[in-house]
Amino acid sequence: SSMKGLGTSDNLLINWMIMAKDRMDEIREAFKELNDGQTLQEWLDYDISGQDYKNLMLKLASRRCPRFNGQEVGLSQEPPASKEDAILTFTKCFNKLCRQRKQSG
């Protein structure tokens, strides 16, 4: 098995990285502050053995986390009046985000 030999600290690291994946930008900043300028990626690269496992952890640690308007203050909007309105709103928003992401590379 590819996970054979992983210890408790590896399991904790995997769980923590998965739970923190949506706030990885903040995690990277805090890690660097708390570790005298050493980046999370540098620490992982030094500390982890096993190339596949290391690559996975480095990809998670390097994950970009886009922020959406209102996310930081918990803004929300009223639910759509109908299922059709919900689908239309979702489709418009999803298509807009896809176009923006494609344009940004």
Image (cartoon, grey):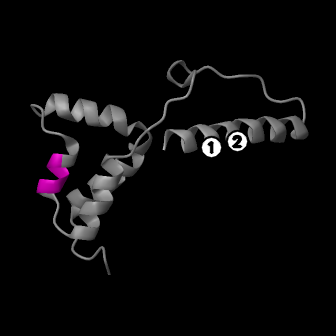
Determine whether label 2 and label 1 are within 8 Å by CB.
yes
Q: Main secondary structure of the magenta part?
A: helix
Looking at the image, which is closer to me, 24 or 105?
A: 105
Q: Give the amino acid at mark 1.
A: Cys
Residue 94, placed above or below residue 76: below
Residue lying at the far bottom in this picture: please name it: 1
**Which residue: 61% across, 19% down?**
75
Residue 3 coordinates in the image, percent (x, y): 30, 73
Give the distance between the C-alpha atoms of the residues marked 2 and 1, in whole angstroms. Answer: 5 Å
Residue 7 coordinates in the image, percent (x, y): 21, 65
**Which residue: 55% across, 28% down?**
68
**Which residue: 44% across, 40% down?**
22
The reply to whether the magenta stretch includes residue 1 is no
Residue 60 coordinates in the image, percent (x, y): 35, 51
Residue 53, placed above or below residue 105: below
Marks counted in the figure total: 2
Residue 1 coordinates in the image, percent (x, y): 32, 81
Magenta residues span 42-46
Name the mark on residue 98. Answer: 1
Kindly identify which residue carries mark 2. Answer: 95
Q: For the residue carrying disc 2, how many other residues have a C-alpha within 10 Å: few (<14), some (14-19), or many (20+)?
A: few
